[in-house]
Amino acid sequence: MYEKILDAGGNFMINQQLKDNFKKSYDLQANIRNEKKSPEWKEAERKNFLSWLKEDEKEALLDLGAGPGMDSLFFKQNRINPLAIDISPRMVSLCIQKGIEAKVMSFDELQFGERKFDAVWAMNSLLHVPKGDIEEILEKIHALLNKRGLFYMGVYGGEDHEGIWEDDVYEPKRFFSFYSSESIQKLVLNYFTIENFVVLPPESVDSKFAFQSMILRKKEIV
């Protein structure tokens, strides 16, 4: 249904219908999400990745799918310099209100000139990328990282499936890609080494799905 699309220059693009739906869904939910307190398990994920950043003396971080900027604000308050991107203009506006540098951008548009990052943070955002497009996104993330850069990728999953989530409370209903633990680890190995992989069971993340937490390191490709 969502086949790979190329622009006039031969660069891939995520299906425009999907992007338009995500923008509408998250614009409508922006204020609600901004008022929610992060659950303890998400706070623990942030703190754990922060410890990795501090250990490696990382400073510049790209927050992919930043939402209202809660994670970026946490990192900024802990002396990490974040750039937040999100497809939703209202989410980006909320980031800016928090004093966070932020841009409206989708994952297939990741371009920052010569700017690179020590780390990338993606909490429950890359699960919206169709499976036919995810390798190109990982390649872009790899290119944006400095040598030995760190990449946090956290997604709901536990089974191999993709499509519109018909029980979604958001409107328009969102598209999700889920992976088994085996398949998601295999997916990232072309560009990254796996430093840490943990599966949090559904009951611990208040979801019907497990949560796959990965800390990855940029692989030097010859």
Image (tube, rainbow, N blue to C red):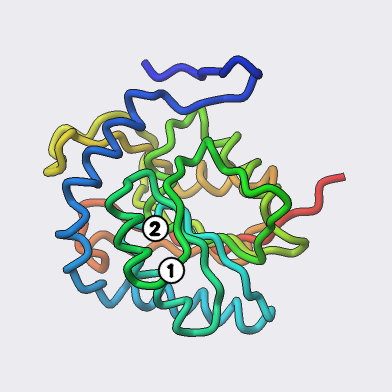
Query: For this view, does 147 lie left or right of residue 110?
Result: right
Please name the amino acid that badge 1 sits on.
Answer: Ile
- Residue 114 lies left or right of residue 131; in this view the side is right
Residue 201 placement: quadrant: bottom left
- Residue 54 appears in which quarter of the rendering? bottom right
- Place of residue 127 in the rendered image (x, y in percent of width and height, measured from the top left): 39, 44
The residue that label 2 is drawn on is: 66
Which residue sits at x=60%, y=77%?
Answer: 53
Q: In the rendered structure, which amino acid carries the disc numbered 2?
A: Ala
Q: Position of residue 27 (x, y in %)?
A: 23, 46
Q: Residue 75: which numbered mark, if any? A: none
Q: Which quadrant holds the C terminus? A: top right
Crowdedness near tag 1: few (<14), some (14–19) or many (≥20) residues, C-alpha within 10 Å? many
User: Closer to the camera, 53 or 103?
Assistant: 103
In the displayed structure image, the side of residue 147 where residue 210 appears, left or right: left
Question: What residue did someone put label 1 on?
Answer: 100
Callout 1 secondary element: loop
